[in-house]
Every structure is written in C-alpha cells, then in structure tokens.
Image (cartoon, coloured by chain):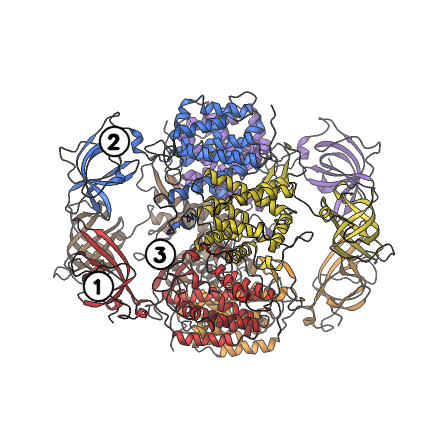
Chain colours: A brown, B orange, C red, D yellow, E purple, F blue
Amino acid sequence: MRYIESFREGDQVSDIYLCKQKQTLVSKVGKNYDSLTLQDKTGVVDGKIWDPNSAAIEDYDSMQYVFINAEVTIFNGKPQLKITRLRKVRDGEFNPADYVPCSPYNIDEMFAELKKLIASVKNPYLGKLLKMFFEEDEKFAAAFKLHSAAKSVHHGFAGGLLQHTLAVTKTCDFLASSYGILNRDLLVTAAIFHDAGKIRELSSFPLNDYTDEGQMIGHIVIGSEMVTEAAAKIEGFPHRLLTELKHCILAHHGEYEFGSPKRPAIIEAVALAYADNLDAKIETLTEAFNGVTPGDPTWLGYNKWLDTNIRRTGIYDV
Amino acid sequence: MRYIESFREGDQVSDIYLCKQKQTLVSKVGKNYDSLTLQDKTGVVDGKIWDPNSAAIEDYDSMQYVFINAEVTIFNGKPQLKITRLRKVRDGEFNPADYVPCSPYNIDEMFAELKKLIASVKNPYLGKLLKMFFEEDEKFAAAFKLHSAAKSVHHGFAGGLLQHTLAVTKTCDFLASSYGILNRDLLVTAAIFHDAGKIRELSSFPLNDYTDEGQMIGHIVIGSEMVTEAAAKIEGFPHRLLTELKHCILAHHGEYEFGSPKRPAIIEAVALAYADNLDAKIETLTEAFNGVTPGDPTWLGYNKWLDTNIRRTGIYDV
Amino acid sequence: MRYIESFREGDQVSDIYLCKQKQTLVSKVGKNYDSLTLQDKTGVVDGKIWDPNSAAIEDYDSMQYVFINAEVTIFNGKPQLKITRLRKVRDGEFNPADYVPCSPYNIDEMFAELKKLIASVKNPYLGKLLKMFFEEDEKFAAAFKLHSAAKSVHHGFAGGLLQHTLAVTKTCDFLASSYGILNRDLLVTAAIFHDAGKIRELSSFPLNDYTDEGQMIGHIVIGSEMVTEAAAKIEGFPHRLLTELKHCILAHHGEYEFGSPKRPAIIEAVALAYADNLDAKIETLTEAFNGVTPGDPTWLGYNKWLDTNIRRTGIYDV
Amino acid sequence: MRYIESFREGDQVSDIYLCKQKQTLVSKVGKNYDSLTLQDKTGVVDGKIWDPNSAAIEDYDSMQYVFINAEVTIFNGKPQLKITRLRKVRDGEFNPADYVPCSPYNIDEMFAELKKLIASVKNPYLGKLLKMFFEEDEKFAAAFKLHSAAKSVHHGFAGGLLQHTLAVTKTCDFLASSYGILNRDLLVTAAIFHDAGKIRELSSFPLNDYTDEGQMIGHIVIGSEMVTEAAAKIEGFPHRLLTELKHCILAHHGEYEFGSPKRPAIIEAVALAYADNLDAKIETLTEAFNGVTPGDPTWLGYNKWLDTNIRRTGIYDV
Amino acid sequence: MRYIESFREGDQVSDIYLCKQKQTLVSKVGKNYDSLTLQDKTGVVDGKIWDPNSAAIEDYDSMQYVFINAEVTIFNGKPQLKITRLRKVRDGEFNPADYVPCSPYNIDEMFAELKKLIASVKNPYLGKLLKMFFEEDEKFAAAFKLHSAAKSVHHGFAGGLLQHTLAVTKTCDFLASSYGILNRDLLVTAAIFHDAGKIRELSSFPLNDYTDEGQMIGHIVIGSEMVTEAAAKIEGFPHRLLTELKHCILAHHGEYEFGSPKRPAIIEAVALAYADNLDAKIETLTEAFNGVTPGDPTWLGYNKWLDTNIRRTGIYDV
Amino acid sequence: MRYIESFREGDQVSDIYLCKQKQTLVSKVGKNYDSLTLQDKTGVVDGKIWDPNSAAIEDYDSMQYVFINAEVTIFNGKPQLKITRLRKVRDGEFNPADYVPCSPYNIDEMFAELKKLIASVKNPYLGKLLKMFFEEDEKFAAAFKLHSAAKSVHHGFAGGLLQHTLAVTKTCDFLASSYGILNRDLLVTAAIFHDAGKIRELSSFPLNDYTDEGQMIGHIVIGSEMVTEAAAKIEGFPHRLLTELKHCILAHHGEYEFGSPKRPAIIEAVALAYADNLDAKIETLTEAFNGVTPGDPTWLGYNKWLDTNIRRTGIYDV
C-alpha cells in the first residue's frame, strides 16, 4: 500500500484511503467542489475534487473507505491530492488496520504480558474480577486490545489503551516490590482497571471520538461503575476491598481539577496516580520527539501540557 | 425534659442525655477522672466525673444514653457539669428525637410537599424512578426524611437532607417556569436526587459521621450509582435521558475543585448547581444568624465559607 | 426590508444598511478598493467596492446608514456583497430598530412588568429612589428600555439590560417568598439597580461599545455612584439602608476576581449575586443554542464561559 | 507617666490608662472577677480585679480612661496587673495622645511636607481639589493628620495615614522625575488621595476599628466617591481628568483579588499601585523588626504577609 | 539506656538526654523555674526544674547533653519530668546515635547499594563527578550518610537523606529500564545529586535546623552550585551535559510554586521530579501510619500534605 | 541608509539588510521561490525572490547581511519586497548598529551614570565585586552595554539591559535615601547585578535569542553563579553578605510563579523586586504607547502583561 507520509509532488496515487471528513464548497468562480480529508495510519492529507458531478466520481460520504486516482500537488508547502476518480470500496478490499494509527509495540505481546500480571494477583476476589473482564468477556478483551487511550493527546492510537495500561501496571508492580507498605494485589488490579472506562468514553477506531456518555459521565466514573456491577456478581466480595478499588479508580487523576471526585486517601491510590501521570508525560514527550533525531539540541518550542519549551537530551557516547 | 441550652450556674440536673464522647484522663494530682461530652438536641455540654470508681457511677461508653445527677458550674465562661451519679438507660426510657438537632420545619409536611413535586413529573421513566425510591422503598423514604445533609456545616440536623432537597427542588421548579428552555421533568428529578447519595455518605443520627464509603467514594458518585442501578430495572429507560440525569447529579457541585468530576454541560445541570449552592449559602447564613436579633447591626466576624465578615440586614419599619 | 440573514448567492440587493466598519485597502494589482462591514438586526455581511472612485459611489463613513445596489456572491463559503452603487441616507429614510439586534421579548411588556415590581416595594425610601429613576427621569427610563447589557457576550442586544434586569428581579422576588429571612424590599430594589451603571458603561446602539468611563470605572462603581447621588436628594434616607443597597450593587459579581470590590456580606447580596450569575449563564446557553433544533444531541464544542463542551438536552415526548 | 512597656515584676503602679476591653468572668471557686485590657501608646497589659464589688472599685466600662492602683505580677511569662483600686477620670486629667500608638515621625513636619507637595501641583483643577480637602476643610485635615492607615497591620497608629500617604507621594514624585512619560500632577494628586477613604473606613483613635461603611463599601470606593462629590463643585473640571483620577484610586490595589474593581489601565495607576504596595511591605518589615537589633542574624520566623521567613540584613562596617 | 517512649507515671529516671531547649520562667508565686525539652531518638519529653538554684543543678545550656535524676509525672495526659539533679556530661559518656531519630534501614547497607548504582554509570564525566563526592570526598560521604532530608516533614531523621536518595535513584533506574528513551546515566546521576544541597541547607544532627544559607538560597540552587564547582575541575566535561544535569537538579520540584526556578524541559527531568515526589508522598504516609496496626480501618483525619483525610488499606488474607 | 519603516508602494530599494530568516517554498504552479524576512533597526519586511536560480541571485543564508535590488509592493496592506538582485556583503560594508533595534537613550551616558553609582558603593567587598565585572572585565562591560534585556517583551533592544539596570538602580538609590532601614550598598549592588545573568541567557544581537543555558538554567540562577564565582576570588568576602547578595538576585522576581526559587526574605530583596517589576511595567507601557500621540484618548485594546485594556493619559495644558 502507498502510505500518505510518502507522498511527493507529482506522484500519481491509486489506492484506498479512509475519507475522514467531506465538505462541499463553492469556488470563487461559483462552482461547487469537494474538500476531503483522507487518512491512513501514517497521517492525513487534504484532497480536492474539482468536478464532483463527473461520472468518474461515485457517491460517497465521510467515514467511508474510497479508492481514488489522484495527483499529488503542493499547497502552502504541504501535499494535496487532486482527485480525478473515486469509488466506494467494500469490506474485504482493504485491511482496516492500515487506516488507523497504531501502537509501535506488538499488541498480542503486550496483552500476554498484561495477562501474566493478572495471573500474579493472589487475592481471589480481585483475581476473579480481572478474569471476568480480560478472560471471560471476549468482547471486552478484544475491544481493550484495540482501543486508544485518547482522542488527540498521548496514546491516541490503536493499542494505546493497552500500551498505557501495561506501562502503568508495570511501574506499580515495581513500586509494590520497592515499598513493602503497598498492597500489591490492590495496586496492580487498580492499575489494570484505572482507564477501563475509556472503552465507553471513546468510540472505537476509525472514529475514535468522545461518546455522549464519555462527555457527560467520563471514564473515571464509568470505570468505577463497571467494577461495581461486576463485583456484585462475585459472592462474598469484601465491601471494604471494593470501596478501596473504586477509590483508586476515582482518585487516579490525583487532583480535583483534573476530574477526580476524590483525592487519593490510601497509599495505593497515591502510587497509582503518580504512575499514571508519569506514563502520560513520558509518552507525551516521546510523541513530541517523534521525527526528531536523538540527541538533536534544537529546542522544539512550547509544549502546552508540560508548560515549558522542550528539547531532546544529548547523547554522549564515549 | 431539661434542655442543655437552659443550664445556669448552680442548677441541679437529673435527666437523660446522650454521651457523645468519653475520655479517661489523669489529674495534676495523679488521679483518674472522666471527661464527657453530653448532647441533646439543643447543644452539647462538657461533664466531669471526678470519682469514676464510685459505686454511684455505672459502667458506660460513648454513644450511649445515660441518666445523670449533676451540678452546673462555670468554667472558662461556659457551663460544665460536675456529675455525681450516672447510670445507663434502656431504650424506651427516652425519646431519641430529643437528642439530635432537628430541622425547624415539620418533616411530614416537607415530605408531603416533596411528594407533590414528584407527582408532577410527567415523564414516565423519571416518574417511575422517583417512585421506586420515595414511595416503593419505605426504608429509603424513612431514612431520607430523618437524614442530615452534613456532618457539621449547613443542614447538619435531622431532616436537613429533606429540607435542603425540598428548597432546591422548589427553586428549580420556579426556574423551569421562568425559563422555558429548561426541561422541567429532568430538572425537578435531578434536584430531588442530587444529594440522595448522602444516605450512604453519612451515617444516621445520633452518630451522623462520614462512613467509609462516604470518605472514599462520596455522595456525588454514590448518587449516580443509585440512579444507575434503579434505572436498570425500568424497561426502556432512554439511555440518553439516564445519562443526562446522572450528569446533573455528577455536575451539581459546579466545579472540579468542589468534587464534581464533570462541569455542567447541559442547561439543567447549570440551573441545579446554582439552586443547590444558593440554598447552601442561605442556610449557612441563617444558621450563623441563629441567636442574633433580626436587624442587629453588629458584625459577626469572619465567615469562612463566605470568605468575608458578615452581619444581619437592618429592619426599616415605617 | 431585505434582511442580511436571507441573502443567497446571486441575489440582487437594493436596500439600506448600517455601515459598521469601513477600510480602504490595496489589491494585488495595486488598485485601491473599499472593504465594508454592513449590519442589520439579523447579522453582518462583508461588502467590497472595487471601484470606490466611481461616480456611483458617494462619500460615506463608518457608523453611517447607506443605500446600496449590490450582488450577493459567496467567498469562503460565506455571502459577500459586490457593491456597485452607494449613497448616504438621511434620518427618516430608515427605522433604526431594523439595524440593531433586539431582545426576543416585547420591551413595553417587560418594562410594565418591571414597574409592577417597583410598585410592590413598600419601604418608602427605596420606593422613592426607584421612582426617581424609572418614573420621574424619562430620559433614564427610555435609555434603560433600549440599552444592551453587554458588548458581545450574553444580552448584547437592544432591550438586553431590561430583559436581564427583569429576569434577575423576578428570581429575587421568588427567593424572597421562599426564604423568609430575606428583606424583600432591599433585595428587589438591589436587583433592579444592580446593572443600572451599564447605562454609562456602554454607549447606546448602534455603537454599543465601552465608554471611557466604562473602561476606567466600570458599571459596578458607576451604579453605586448613581444611587448615592440620588439618595442624597431624599430626605431622611437611612444611612445604613443606603449602605446596604450600595453594598448589594458593589458585591453583585460575588467575587473579587470578577470585579466586585467587596464580597457579599449580607444575605440579600448573596441572593442577588446568585440570581444575576444564573441568569447570565442561562442566557449564554440560550444564545449558544440559537439555531440548534431542540433535542439535537450534537455536541456544540467548547464554551469558554462555562469552561466545558456543551449540548442541548434531549426531548422525551411520550 | 508610667508606660506599660516598662512594667517589671513587683512594681507598684498608680496611673491612668485606657480600658480597651472589660469582661466579667467566674473563677473556679465560683466568684465573679473582672478581666481587663489596659492600653497606652507603648502597648497593652492584662489586668485582673479579683474583688470587683469592693468599694475601692468604681463603676467603669470599656473605652473609658481609668486611674488604677495595682501590682505587677508575671503570668505565663507576661506582666499582669493585680488591680486593687480603680476610678474613672475626667477629660483633662490625661493627654489622649499618651494612649494611642503613634507614628515615630513628627506629624506637623510630615503634614508640612505633604502641603509642599500639594502646592507643587500645577494643574488648576487638581490643585483646587487638593486644597478643598487639605486646606479649606479643617476638620478633614485635622482628622487626616491623626488617622491610622489600618486596624492591625502596617501603619496601624495615629499619624499612620499621613506617614503612609507622604511616603507613597514622595516615591511617586521621584518616579515622575525619573520617567518622563508620567503625568506628575495626576500621579501626585492620586497618591495624596489614594487612601483618603480610610477616614470613613476606620473610626478614629482610640477605637480605630472598621466602621459599618468601611466593611460594606471599603476605602477604595469611598475615596472615589469623595473625589467625585468634591469635583462636582469645581466648575469646568475636565471629565476625562476626573475619570483618570478616580481610576487611579479605584485601581491602586493593583489586582482584583486585593479589592480593586479595575486593574491599572493608565501608566500613572500602575506607578501608584507599586509605590503603595512597596511602602506597605517596607513598613510591615520595619514594624516586624521593631525591637530586633540592627544586623541581628536571627531568623524571625514566618511572616504571613510576605509569605516567607524573614530576618534583618547584616551590618558590614569596615 | 532508658528511652523516652517507655516513660510511665511514677518512674524514676537516671540517665543522659539531649537538652534540646531550655527556658527560664516565673511561676505564679513569683519564683524562677526552668522548663526543658529533653530528646532521645524515640522522642521528646518536657521537664521542669522547680529549684534551679539548688546545688544539685549544675550550669547547662540548650544543645548540651545532661545526666538527670527525675520522676515521671503526668500533665495534660502526657509524661513530664520533675528533675531534681542535673549535670553536664562529657563526650564519650554517651553515644550520640542514641539521641537522634534514625532511619529504620541500615545506613551502611543503603550506602553500599547507592555506590553500586554509582559504579553502574558508564558516562566517564558523570561517573567521575559522582566519585568526586561519594568516594574521594570522605567528609561529604560521611555527612551524606548521616544527614536528614528535612527538618520536620518526611525523612526528618539521620540517614533520611540517604534513604530518600536511594529510593528515588532505584525508581529512576527502573524507569530507565522501562522507557528506552530515557538516558540512564544522566537520570541516575541526577537522582543521586538531586537533594545533595541539603547537606548545606540543613545543619547536622542533633540540631537539624535550617542554616542561613538554606533559608536564603535553598538546597535546589546550592545543589546546582556544588555540581558546577566540581565539574569545573573535570577536564572536558561537556557543557551541554553539565547544563542538563544542573537543569534536572533545578527542576526537580517540578513546578515553580514548589521552588524550582525552571520546569522540567527534558525527559529525564520529568522522570526525576515524579520519582522524587512519589517517594516523598509514600514516606509521608508511611510515617503517618507509624503506630497504626496494618489493616486498621480507622480514619486518621486530615493530612495537610495530601490535602485529604487518610487511612490505612485493608488486609485481605484468604 | 534607506530604513524599512520608510518603505512606500512603488519605491525602488537598493541597500543592505540583515536576512533574519530564509525559506524556500513552492508556488501553486509548482515553482520554487524564496521567502525572506529582512531586518534593520526600524523593523522587519517580507521579501520574495520569484526566480531564485537567476544569475542575479547569489548564494546566501539566514543571519547574513545582503545587498538587494527590489521593488516595494503591498500585500495584505503591508509592504513586501519583490527582489530581483541579491548579493552577500562583507564586514565593513555596513554598520551592524543599523540593523538592531536600539535603546532611545545614549549608551555611553547611561554606562557612565551606572559607573558613578558603582563608585558610590562604600563596602569594599561589594565595591570590588562590582569593579571586577564592570571595570576589570572589559569583555563583560562591552557585552553588558550592548545586550538586550529580553527576546521580545520590554527592553528587547540593544542597550536594553543597561537601560533597565540603570533605571532599577536609580530607583533603589532613591528608596535607600527614603527609607533609612535599607542597606544602600547591598541594595544598589544587587540592583546592578540582578539581571547580569542575561548576558548568558540571551545571545547577542543580531540573533538575540535564548541560549541553551538560558532555557535550562535561566538568568536568575546564572546571575547567582556569576557572583558566587567572582566573590570566591575576593579574600575575606563575608559569607553572610554574599548570601544576602545572592538571595537578592535569586528572589528578584518576587514570587515562585515568576521563576524565583526563593521569596524576598530581607528588606533589600523586597525593595529590589518592586523596583525591577515597576520598571518592566512602565517600559512595557512606554513601548505599547510608541507611535501613539501623547494624550490620545483612544483605547489600545488588551495588553496581556497588564491583563487589561490600556490607553494613554490625557494632557491638560492650562
């Protein structure tokens, strides 16, 4: 397949892309034309159809996959497609995985690693709860593997939720080994569930946008609800343990102003909030450094989330 | 019954009080003595038992009702009881209502008014939801009538939750009549449920303290959970309507820093947050002015919640 | 009259509009042309005069009313006028009310309702003060009826000050009936005067911009000044009552950071601040929902003043 | 006169003091006694009258001047008076200036310096305005010379308002000479009037407490009002100049959160806010260092207003 | 030795303690007495010398070690010593380690672990820098092993600086293994040096108080200075590498409001700030839980640093 | 020389300018062209080279001085150069001072005034320290005279650092004369050094951008370092005096959130922070008013740094 990031001026393109957005506009001379955003997993590109009524242009809509013939031009220094033919394609003609940005890590390997961590939880109630989601609920497990963790900021790609969850859980596992006061079973379980509510907060790829429930309730409360409902089906689940697990989920943003309705009040909630926040910051920088040569001393300008200018660290081989 | 607020120096007291707290201390001369906090609905008073091993002093503990013989003395300008006899009493010897602070309004009348508002909700799903709690669940209804709305700040008395809920709902009812854009059924229902989670956040009187679940989860998320569970039993309850109702409950503190995991995003949530906050402020002042003659121009000093010195308004009869 | 909101591509327009802004620019080929913003009460539209030296184009300036002949074109998806003739018009050729955005409610009816509320104030000093402005000062009353309450945010239209004042006063009237501790006369009077300083803070339509005094002193202090000066003419006006009224005006933004030099210290000031803020928020949403079908579940994006994404509430007819 | 700061254990005191506060309490053995706070300009001291019904103790009340016979004892490391005789004194028996804390600078000299600055203002309208207060209004001038600038923080002594006003005005005078862009007449006039509202915000000595108007309106708005009323009596006073002067007064706290309803929008308002704030901070430290040997390296602990621990600077004589 | 935490009413005590504070006071009957604070590593206790002029009481001062004969009494529910004999002791009569609170971990083992981490740094410049402090500068190394990390909050005991530094460095070591983008040598080195400035910010035990330099400059800038001076002695130390190391030290509090003059701008600075903050929070809770039975569900009340009520987590043995 | 601010449409320009930025772009018709930013001390102008491969266009790069032949056109209302010839020039063909914005005051006169203030410092250690930089280190002195004090905000021109330092020092000198408690030598010295770190924080003109060290360490800590290193070479420099000087430098931004790692804890640090901040604000306004006629009443819109709309003050000649 011909990926968008490889487009160069003058190229002829004949391939399938996801039409993420479509708009019909009017040119200065009064003619209708279509302006499209096409997407594959390497990025997006603008396209123009100057003659949308041509027989060579089939009916189509946003969020559909289309086969196009086009020429690559440059506008304002960026590639733009001049599309001359377009037809909708059927499922099976393309591999959806080619059209969504994806985690750089192997999803199956990450999931296997997560399941090993699940298997290591000794408390039977927490262990059962984890298995209800990640082993017995195949639909949930499949969705969890492919979900993103965000619409546009860090981990906003397929597998992003899994990648983030695994990294946070591994850090929590380390912390439990480092600080004996931490309850490892509770901390690891809370880490695995902390962002599970994102399954309902964000729609699946290729749309990957906030759902109505996501905007109104949010993944923090949704995650607490999910755990509440499941635990109700486990006989004898200790009430205090469930309260602590829910508290860890509710408090994992650490502060009221980041949307947590409670501040961390037990030590595992404190540890989880740090592990979560740290992974988010490191991934934010990792993504910001994408395309920057390691060791490049150039300042990349202001990063809103870190509230400072940023740059890569030097490399000092000896 | 002899109420605490009427104690004067030199009085002899022989009556039943709730022993809210009990502490055994050592005097300067090395003798043990007991220091108690006794409570009835008009207030609290310190008591001392200088000879706790006397035969006249039975075994007792905190949160028990005790009959005492005592003399009223004054210490640091406040009444203090010198207790010479004490015995535990049995249920039936006293009326619990005499020992908890209580709303100045009639509880049954307030509840009847609330039920009239419930009956006025036309949407069948919201109407059914309200009835499941306030009509069909007698235990809930009974608890709701007697619960406080706080441990120590405004509405911290029996009937406080009902009084606050009714006032907020009435203001919302007025707003729905004043601003046609508001969905009255949703707003009134959300007003009635907005603090329902306090049933589990605070224990009942006479203890009236935060529960473990209250500290860890909080009434905002508990209330959302209660509504979620109940709506699951109503066939066909529109998902979007439930989401809106839960959003109103979750957002009713208006700001992240006051513990809401979402800011009001629909207009009914905005109206509810104002009505709730306004009633809290007015009740705070009403309680602060308790005992101050109407029209008294004296400044009462700094009020923490209003972040300013306060005083009563003048009276200008003509 | 031909309203701007009805312009469609290709229309020929021959009518009078307010020229809100005028700029002389130079085209890429080095020729002068005029770029105008024309306004009527339904909106604004850009216009171009490609040949400003033509005999068909009279001298004119911004903030003048002009009769134009023009053709509607589309540029960047929005209507734009290609103006071929233009002449200034005289007073009398047009109705100024057609050129300013206006409250959706009837101004005379609103004013009558406000006067009923004024008549209901029993305290003779407050009653006299209200009458001095709203009955005896015809110029003030006329201005108050037509003033906007803002330059660009909520209630930024003719009659906006009246509409906002009436809504706030009605809510205060309800609150006084609901909470017996409130001094109704003081609260209603303060509500009616709370934004009166906007008469001097904002210039009249069609300009509707901040005055020098508005920027330097602000409507809060101006309003307090207006009341101070008028009360000085009423013999025997109780000093404490005047202080309370001024305090309500000065504190009505509720917090220092919103420009109030004092936080509400008496209960009526608290109630007024809430009623004012609530009406502002509800009107903000009402205006944001303008043009959105009731019940439309689409999210409208971020609203700066509410600091959240917003959407309309659902409609659940049964 | 025998000053309070010189009291030592065992001293016999027979002199006149101001009784600032009086409280009747009950001892552990059930007897009434009086607890007083006595004040002179060097400080305050607690006193006890163990036998208030004795013939040697006349009737008296708080805020009265009393002649006492007493012995100095030490309680909790601080002097305390055991009062055995007390009688009220008449005006004339004492010099009120002995009983209020007073500026360390000569009041008449400071006032003369201020009047020289007033005389240097060339703009006739501003000059006339200043003279209306400081020359023609003898009552105002007399009050201004003796007023404090605060109840308890910096400059909380007789002459404090004058001392602070003079220091701020001198700094403004320097700034006008240093930065040519500043309008000296406006800046100097604004500096002289900036805290004039304190005349009505605080009552006079010896009470020196907030007035009702002070709490409700505040010296910022009161000062603006005073200038508005006076300027109305000066024919032809330019409206824009008056607006600028009022703006400087209203904005002199620099930020909304310090009670200014407007932030400084003209350059003189910026300069005044800095000069005012700087003098307040320097005086705060000067008073905090009172009694500390110059050069003493000891840390004095946390200073709330500076939000840091503080200490005196070293002395490095060579 | 007889430790303070074991004192019970009526005990006779004859042992050596550190006199942390000494004050001479006057009793109600006018006699001088001494009030002391005595300290050993288990805590502090108040002592009184009612007859300081007795021949049995030698001259002594605060921060000296004294041998006492005393009886344990109880005052306000806490032990208090009635001291009848006191003499100063010489170095050698006591073991200073008995008089300072101490890390619960073995200091030599911790230091060995830290040196292993130092040995693992491959970059020769960073490795040399570390060795200059921790191997070649014996005085520094000895001080580092025994220093506390705080005056009164977390890690405020001998070995606290080492314990904290080791925990932070181990977490950073884990993070470098978990996130390949991190420069391990830089991160580990920065972790080891991040609080090195505390050597000069706090005086050594037993005083353990802020130094003048600590209050005026602070350990963040001191640490940066220490590294700057040492690196100047290493030929060829890359300027950019030194800048990055200093930046990590300067930015390790993460935010301006916690005293960092720069926010983390490179990824290692981000990781360090989290590891540091997390260890501080976990140690704060660990110390707060000191004395609470693991699993005890009781709420411990408000913790200022975490800004919430806290409690221990449950234990769920199966 | 032909200055950029004098360019008018149709002018032919043949002169030397600094090429601040250079970008090669592609036109809509697919041809390469160059887009340049040219600078002299009066401003910047865009230029286009439509035929960069022409023999008339020599090789060149950004930050080089170039001689051009061009015609002035107007694009989007602003001048734009159509460049037809371009050649690089050699040092000597131009005066660098013509190409950087410059202080409106005479640099040598300002420096002489600063040296007079330096000479007035009586403390021998501080005097020596000042001379080491401003007299003995010619390279430093030369750089200090020409450095800017900022990249883009106030004092962002050659001589800006000197102009700002002099103004702040003069104000501090005045304050020391006005408030006897201030240590003049310390305050004046701290004022002179407070921004010295900008020498390393910002690169010299014409680049005038943040250095790597500037972004990572910042001028506050750099300045403290510079003073530390120099004082180490002065025998007997009192440690406490050096600590106080460094504290003044570190604390001169006054608040943590402005990048100071310590808040002012001694009185000279307080005074310096005010003098610094005041000069910055006055210069910000002075630059904002550049080009506005004195007395012009027009509002200039929102000023971000003052957080308010601003305007010039009126002129009231009599």
Could you tell whether C40 is left or right of E110 in the image? left
Vertical arrangement, residue D10 with respect to residue E227, above or below: below
> Contact (CB < 8 A) between labels 1 and 2?
no
Q: Distance between the residues labelled 1 and 2?
A: 52 Å
Which residue does the numbered mark 2 point to in the structure image?
A: F65
Which percent across, then down, holds residue A278?
44, 45
Task: Give the number of the mark in front: 3 or 1.
Answer: 1
Which residue does the numbered mark 3 point to in the structure image?
A: A142
Vertical arrangement, residue E32 with respect to residue E238, above or below: below
> Contact (CB < 8 A) between labels 3 and 1?
no
When asked about the image quadrant of residue F203, the answer is top left
Residue placed most toward the observer, A24 or C72: C72
- The disc label shown at residue D116, or none: none
Q: How crowded is mark 1: few (under 14 residues within 10 Å), some or many (20 or more)?
A: some
Instruction: Please name the amino acid that badge 3 sits on.
Output: Ala
Q: How far apart are marks 2 and 3 (CA)?
A: 62 Å
At 36% from the left and 72% from the top, the residue drawn is C104
Which residue does the numbered mark 1 point to in the structure image?
A: C87
